[in-house]
Image: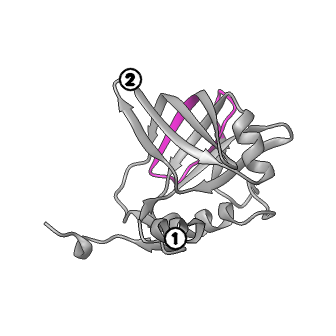
Amino acid sequence: MTDLFRNAFRSHPAGVAVITAVGVSGPVGLTASSLASVSADPPALSFSLSGSRSAEQLIEAETVLVHMMDAAQVELVKLFSKPGTERFTSGMNWSTLPTGEPLLLDAPWALRCRITHRVPVGASILLAAEVLDVLTTPGKAAPLVYHDRAFHRLTDESRMD
């Protein structure tokens, strides 16, 4: 059943986010495709994490930044998806918010969140968070989705009205 479950979700496209926070030794972050809207009033979201040192530090963080990424940031998304890669380098376009979280400046949307619930589910932790601030970068780019273990760009031509 595990293989069938994985295959089912490989055929289900998902948006792509990079989640960052301040960890015990500085900024940490990783790519996630489990982001979901939970409530619009009050604004809340959820995502799940497992398996890496970055995930462990994000799970323990009080606040996180959830960056909703677009196709223009696919290389950055790939960098944050590979364990052991160097992140938050001087060549990367990022800064630190006054509240301490690392902000990826090219992300079209960044949601500053306070973790409200941590729920163990199998080998993962499901995190629910209230949205404290919404930051945006002007401009329009193609959305980025994860489907069948690869990143894909959505275009106007892919729209089906």
Q: Which residue reaches farthest left?
A: 161
Query: How many numbered circles does the render carry?
Result: 2
Instruction: Of the two numbered discs 2 and 1 on the same chain, state the one appearing first in sequence.
Output: 1
Three-letter code, disc 1: Leu
**Residue depth check, mark 2 versus mark 1: number of the one nearer the observer:** 1
Q: Is residue 148 magenta?
A: no
Residue 94 point in image, percent of width and height: 64, 49
Residue behind mark 1: 4
Instruction: Provide the residue designation for mark 2.
Output: 42
Residue 46 on image: x %, y %: 51, 39
Task: Examine the image and state in which quarter residue 114 appears.
Answer: top right
Percent across and percent down for residue 158 are: 26, 74
Residue 75 in the image, given as x and y percentages of width and height: 59, 70
Above or below — where is 28 with respect to 83?
Answer: above
Q: Residue at x 70, y 38 (%)?
A: 59
| Callout 2 crowding tier (Cα within 10 Å): few <14, some 14–19, many ≥20 | few
Query: Which region shows up in magenta?
Result: 96-115
In this view, which residue lies farthest toward the right? 25
Q: Quadrant of residue 86?
A: bottom right
State the CA–CA distance, disc 2 to disc 1.
36 Å
Q: Is residue 110 magenta?
A: yes
In the visual, does 36 lie left or right of 30? left
